[in-house]
Amino acid sequence: MRKDINNFREESLNYHSKFPSGKIQISPTKKYNSQRDLSLAYSPGVAEPCKEIARFSRDVYKYTSKGNLVAVITNGTAVLGLGNIGALASKPVMEGKAILFKIFSGIDVFDIEIDESDPEKFINVVKAISPTFGGINLEDIKAPEAFEIERRLKSELNIPVMHDDQHGTAIISGAALLNSITYVGKKIHDIKMVINGAGAAAISCARIYKHLGVKSKNILMFDSKGLLHNSRKDLNKEKKEFSVNTYYPKNLAEAIKNSDVFIGLSIGGILTPDMLKSMAKDPIVFAMANPDPEIDYDLAIKVRPDVIIATGRSDYPNQVNNVLGFPYIFRGALDVHASIINDEMKLAAIHAIASLAKEPVPEQVNIVYNKKNISFGKEYIIPKPFDNRLITRVSPAVAKAAMDSGVAKNPILDWKKYKEKLLDRMGYESKILRMIQNRARTNPKKVVFCNGEEYNILKSAQILNKEGIISIPIVLGNENRIKNLMNTNNLNVELKIIDPEKEKNIKKIEHYSQILWKRRNRKGLTLYESKIKMRTNDYFGAMMVDQGEADAVMTGYSRSFSLSLRILLEVIGRSDTFHKTAGMMILLTKRGPLFLADTSVIPNPTSEELARIALMASYVVKDFDIEPHIAMLSFQNFSSNSKISSKVSQTVAFLHKKYPDLIVDGELQPDFALNEFLLASKFPFSKLVKKKANIFIFPNLESGNMTYKFIRGLGNIPIIGPVMLGMRKPAHIMQMQSSIEEIVNLSTLCVIDAQIRKN
């Protein structure tokens, strides 16, 4: 265990220190390549928007990034589970919060760490820098100062201010509470609630619950010294709000008897099985202490099968995760230029989140969490964090509440257009990766790696195993060399190491050799040659998958693609559906994932082969719950006066006739295929005018291969692949000398491929 902790610590430090240091950077949003661009961006052109803003201050939202810029501000006095570590040491956490804002809602963030613990001075600093920002997210500030700091800034600034530590948990748990009570058929004004913990989050939760209908007299709150009651002299004004007139119950165990709801924002393990047993019928338990809940999820279910339990952990159902709220609340507040985040806006967020959980869950979410049919119930009382609908439900609800309550300065007039804009803001390049990884880890598979004597392979196997994507990685190679490499590099991971050359594997070699020889003896393969081949890692690994002893195989790290493919085809072969194989690269771009094929296999495909490539690619894309929109590429637009154009044109005509519901068009030049506005201006009849192309089929191997390698060389777009299309069983070929990131990403897709084939 100590070794695992040390490894994780080292990996975390390496992650943060890798060039460029930290987790965020500033990127230009306008062109800057010419002298004219720079003269517009700065002097003399920049003077014009400055003069406009000086004349009319509201134009700052029109001419600058203020409307999409939030400050994440802290003094580092209450950081995560680390306590008062100071402003400087808190910076990695604030950068992390900045990432969450960006990837879930498209909001840009500057993290501001203020080295000041005096509330008055802290408030003055924040007020002084506030003109820069459209909103302020206060973070990790200790109570009770946090209450006063937020109260003052909300009253003295005219932009949204929210202390997420207080309100984020309150909003998400408030939605969970509404749905839990609905599910068990209780009335919110009748329930008896016990809250253990009396910090900023607990106080905010209690206030929200009162707004939702819980009666003050039905709330008992405990801090580390016991029940909050009026005779105590150590209570601040926030705690006094929830103090009661009695000394009784004396302790938590007495208080919880016959209670309907337990809210835990305290320490792990404090809610005992006996306490849970004493609760009323259909108890509701929100055990939100991290990393250890107030009661273990599995234990709670065992003790009280009728319990609805939520925790702060992602490995259990009903995670109370603040990311369900703050990105979308600020998004809605920013978009209407709200002057404050008021109770009406927070309640709107609660009801939007709660309502979403009751709706049918899109297949995409089912796929990510490897569920057949997620539906409202005990294990699904709040939406999943990867539900893409959150931004189009919560943000509009918050924006509308701001408008209805009179705090919006820029009201939304076209809600349909606004929702489209919300989706356009999303940065899908990293989100799709997380969704792929989340889906893979729900049903880990056995993957065999043929190049086990390479550090990048072993490190990737470690990551995939620790992330729960691969159960036990199987690596092939010399056992001593692999173990030495692991020890030298402190790679602590449970592996199954198989050395095909070892004498103990002779029976397996004999068995595999017979299978291969019987398949290929009429193609010139002798039994002797078959035995030689089976002593190599690539043949052995492919045969393991062929015989069902592994779910998928990864190869190609130290061989050319063509040689690796030949081995896979000899052992595993093509699928019976298409009788062809092809390679597809996935580009993770800001406009969403783009799929490029064929980039690896068929040198000069015929019209029929192009059609098969397009269909194979479309089936893979559908597996990710993405509607395929196929652009058949050429060096001309809708012109059949060359062999290539004619071939592509014939392919499109065939697909239109045979598959009329398939969205496919061409022949198209890549710039037109990527730009629907350009396409509409010249070729308004195209099927891709209203449906952005996401699959791009190249007319020959040279064009596809050079395109993706050119993009790969630029290094600023994550790429996964090549994903093998048309193989009989899950088998994928990584690029020679792939990076660890590339291996991990392709292996993750390899696991999903195996999952799909098992269903």
Image (cartoon, rainbow, N blue to C red):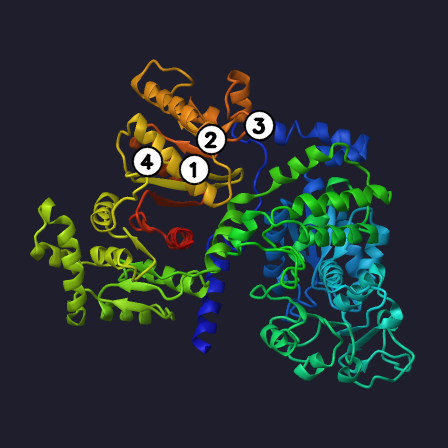
Label 4 vs label 1, nearer the camera: 1
**Cα–Cα gap, marks 3 and 2:** 42 Å
Image location (x, y in percent) of residue 403 = 82, 41
In this orientation, which residue lies closer to the viewer: 559 or 495? 495
Q: Residue at x 67, y 60 (%)?
A: 381
Q: Are marks 4 and 3 in contact (CB under 8 Å)?
A: no
Can you name the residue that lies furthest to the bottom here? 250
**Cα–Cα gap, marks 2 and 4:** 25 Å
Q: Are marks 2 and 4 in contact (CB under 8 Å)?
A: no
Q: Residue at x 61, y 49 (%)?
A: 104
* Of the image marks 1 and 2, the number of the one nearer the N terminus: 1
* Of the image marks 3 and 1, the number of the one nearer the N terminus: 3
Judging from the image, what secondary structure is the residue with disc 2 in?
loop
* Of the image marks 3 and 2, the number of the one nearer the N terminus: 3
Q: What kind of residue is marked 2?
A: Leu
**Cα–Cα gap, marks 4 and 3:** 34 Å
**Cα–Cα gap, marks 4 and 1:** 19 Å
Can you name the residue that lies furthest to the top here? 641
Image location (x, y in percent) of residue 658 = 40, 27
**Cα–Cα gap, marks 1 and 2:** 9 Å
Mark number, residue 662 = 2
Residue density around tag 4, few if under 14, some if 14–19, many if 20 or more, within 10 Å: many
